[in-house]
Image (cartoon, rainbow, N blue to C red):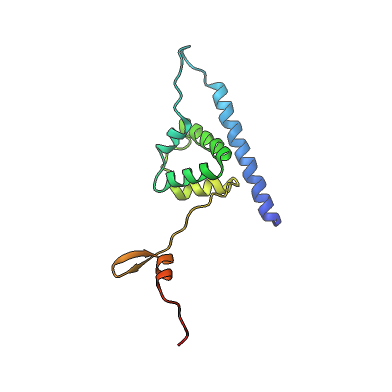
Amino acid sequence: MNEEDSELERLKAKRLAEMQKNISSRQEIQTPKSPEKIIHPNPRDSLIKILGFRGLEVLENAESQFPNESKIIVEKLSELIKTGEIHETIDGGKLLALFRSVGVHVRMETKINIEQDGKFVSLSDKLSNHPSYDGD
């Protein structure tokens, strides 16, 4: 790892710590107006509501590969949604980039499809069904 990479990782860790500190300080300031029991939605459910194209797929892969880290990230994202800091749709690419930016390298299945006779066929199927080149 070169100096730039270690510096970048240090800055990412610092930013994540600042975000956690900001969220916890907001929670301490906000107090319920009535002593009644407040129902808190499941953090995962509030995140799922704003996920876009392939967002759920990325989330499920992250949860299966990194359950502890994913839980923390989901909780923090949910808090940012509640405070209004996140109000946009998060698609799979953005969510994957977020996980990777904090050091959680979620693996995704990659497929390459090609068009053959007006249909899309996976490249692996195409190669496995194609006779190998003999060089003749």
Is 125 placed left or right of 10 in the picture?
A: left
**Can residue 84 be seen in this snapshot?**
no
Quadrant holding the C terminus: bottom left
Indicate the quadrant where residue 87 lies.
Answer: top left
Q: Residue at (64%, 45%) from the top-left corner?
A: 11
Q: Residue at (44%, 46%) from the top-left corner?
A: 57
Above or below — where is 18 with respect to 104? above
Image quadrant containing the N terminus: bottom right
Nearer to the camera, 72 or 28: 72
The picture places residue 74, in percent across and down from the top left corner, at 51, 37
x, y percent for residue 19: 58, 36
Q: Residue furthest top?
A: 35
**Does the image show residue 86?**
yes
Residue 47 is situated, as x and y percent measured from the top left of the image, at 45, 36
Please indicate whether residue 102 sits to the left or right of residue 39 in the image: right
Find residue 95 and report its horizontal and vertical position in percent: 48, 46
Q: Depth check: 47 or 26 in front?
A: 47
Q: Horizontal placement of 108 versus 3: left or right?
A: left
